[in-house]
Amino acid sequence: IMDKSISISTNVSTTTSMEKIDQAASWLSATIISAFFASLDRCACVNLSTSHDDEDEDNEESYHRPLALSAAPHSNDTSKFIPLVMNSHKHNTSPISTLSFSSHYKYSLFATSLDLKRQRFTSPLLLIFLFLCLSFATSMAVSDSDSDSGPVVQTTPLVTFLQRVQLTALRSYSKKPDPKFYIDLSLKLPHDLSTAESAFDDLTTGSRDLSVPVEKLEKFVHEYFDDAGKDLVHHEPEDFVSDPTEFLLNVENDQVREWAREVHCLWRTLSCRVSDSVIESPDRHTLLPLPEPVIIPGSRFREVYYWDSYWVIKGLLTSKMFTTAKGLVTNLMSLVETYGYALNGARAYYTNRSQPPLLSSMVYEIYNVTKDEELVRKAIPVLLKEYEFWNSGKHKVVIRDASGNDHILSRYYAMWNMPRPESSVFDQESASRFSSTLEKQRFHRDIATAAESGCDFSTRWMRHPPNFTTMATTSVVPVDLNVFLLKMELDIAFMMEIAGDRKGSERFVKASEARKKAFETVFWNEKAAQSLRHGKLRTKTTMDAPNGWAPQQELIVTGLARSGLKEANELAEEIARRWIRSSYRVYKTSGFIHEKLNVSEFGAYGGGGEYKPQTGFGWSNGVILAFLEEFGWPSDLSIEP
């Protein structure tokens, strides 16, 4: 799982240098690509499950028993995912650890098997490399209490009302509109919320199913609300120039350079700032006030998103837009200072969850280019607050191994157990298959938690894929989240060294070493690695197939490129060029950069999911530019296949 030759000393005489951070990044990059590629499969994680001796006993009662995982009976067919086994005593397995979410619960953990599935943009060599750094994967289910007593962050009265408007709209139109449109509306002056609610009550009086004539609904919406997106105004980035100095100097092909400039110019289209009305009257909007301009993803996504910003920043740095990049970090830090964590997105209905913690990586990337020590010093207290969020409360998981040693890991856990406001009707319909309120609450929390993971929605979170109602995200201790947190620990250690806080730096180096040890103990599967070394392990992948996503492509490519292996670096370049070529073809045929691509058909964009395909597109633009910066493009290499 890691390069044994890499170590970061915590001796007082040893500093956490940039070189050591880069060395550690080599191991970490390998783990990141493993995490992201492996996490495409539902079993690439540690799961938790209720154990009992009598498989016929009441499911509700057994749901709250201590958790246990056991391996399936021995089988020579490693290509099949080993299903949940409820009774460990029947299969001759031995516990390797105990697991807990609080002092009230202790859980036994047993070894199980692993399965990956291969996508088109990968190859057997990549899979071998990924498996060599792949973390242990198991499958179980979890419960914390007799009722859903987890935390809930309440939303605003406006959001609650807009959910009613959303429901009426979806029941009134024959062709279903985008539900997010209605939740993004803002109250139009001079009306206040109570006036709008009263008018809406009059509109829907007498309607049993809450539907109304479309023309009356549209008149109501136009009279009482400004259109979604009107509370964002265009902003011309002060650091934008159409042809930046030293822009992609290693891109020698004129056709590719011209297209790269077009992608670069899309930053102007996606650059916005929050309108003054949001700052002056925040209760009239679901959009949250932010101090600096933003880069939005595009299309229906009319707000800044947390982990999207990492790849946007990678692209902005390539575009030499350092001020804009710093502004995005400043906005995210303001959210952490206000809420204690970076929100999923800058909307009132996103305050109940975060997204994968990449803020420290954003600061690190900017510092690596600009050497802005002031930004680092401002970021440290904010990152400490975010670090506490991910390593405490419901996010914290403690695993005790067979030697009695505790290992602290983390899971995703949204502070919400109701339908997501932006997709309220969809969630209600999905939950209608459950009979009890408790079951519905658990389901809603698992859906919101999947959204916190950034992988919404993937079969990796489902007990019985592709059955959406078997979502069990809170039951998973995911590899990728813990890799991000290890990276955060190394980033904070590095930044504290810059700020002159040697003791603080040493503390976070020790924390990163403890998490590395947890990876070796909890996630690593030596048996799978040995099958792999002999070339006998069969592999395959899932997650939203056949869609390919820019973030996962970038993480895989970056990890391979940093591995130090010639073959891995060649494969990284091959994957990057395939992605660039396919993105180019889609752009030339559709006129847009898309959120996702269809990796099974060259030059096709992705589809499926909760909403129709989106264009713009923030993180896709960033990854294209970052790939071109990293690998360049020779003059004699055609971008056409």
Image (spheres, helix red, strand yellow):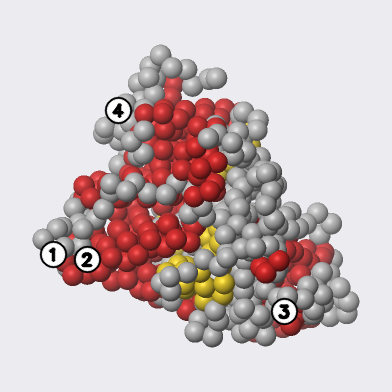
* Comes first in the chain, label 2 or label 4: 4
* Comes first in the chain, label 4 or label 3: 3
Instruction: Name the spot of residue 539 as percent of width and height, x first.
Output: 61, 40
Q: Which residue is mark 1?
A: 12
Q: Give the camera-side residue of 435 and 340.
A: 435
- Give the amino acid type for the residue marked by disc 1 in the picture: Val
- Alpha carbons under labels 4 and 3: distance apart: 63 Å
The picture quadrant where one finds residue 263 is top left
* Comes first in the chain, label 1 or label 3: 1
- Count neighbours of disc 4 (C-alpha within 10 A) and say few if under 14, some if 14 to 19, many if 20 or more: few
- Give the amino acid type for the residue marked by disc 4 in the picture: Leu
Marker disc for residue 62: 3
- Alpha carbons under labels 1 and 3: distance apart: 51 Å
- Alpha carbons under labels 2 and 1: distance apart: 8 Å
At 38% from the left and 16% from the top, the residue drawn is 635
Instruction: Name the spot of residue 191 as percent of width and height, x first.
Output: 61, 78
- Alpha carbons under labels 4 and 1: distance apart: 42 Å
- Count neighbours of disc 2 (C-alpha within 10 A) and say few if under 14, some if 14 to 19, many if 20 or more: many
Tag 1 secondary structure = loop
Q: Which quadrant holds the C terminus?
A: top right
Marker disc for residue 506: 2
Q: Are marks 3 and 2 in contact (CB under 8 Å)?
A: no
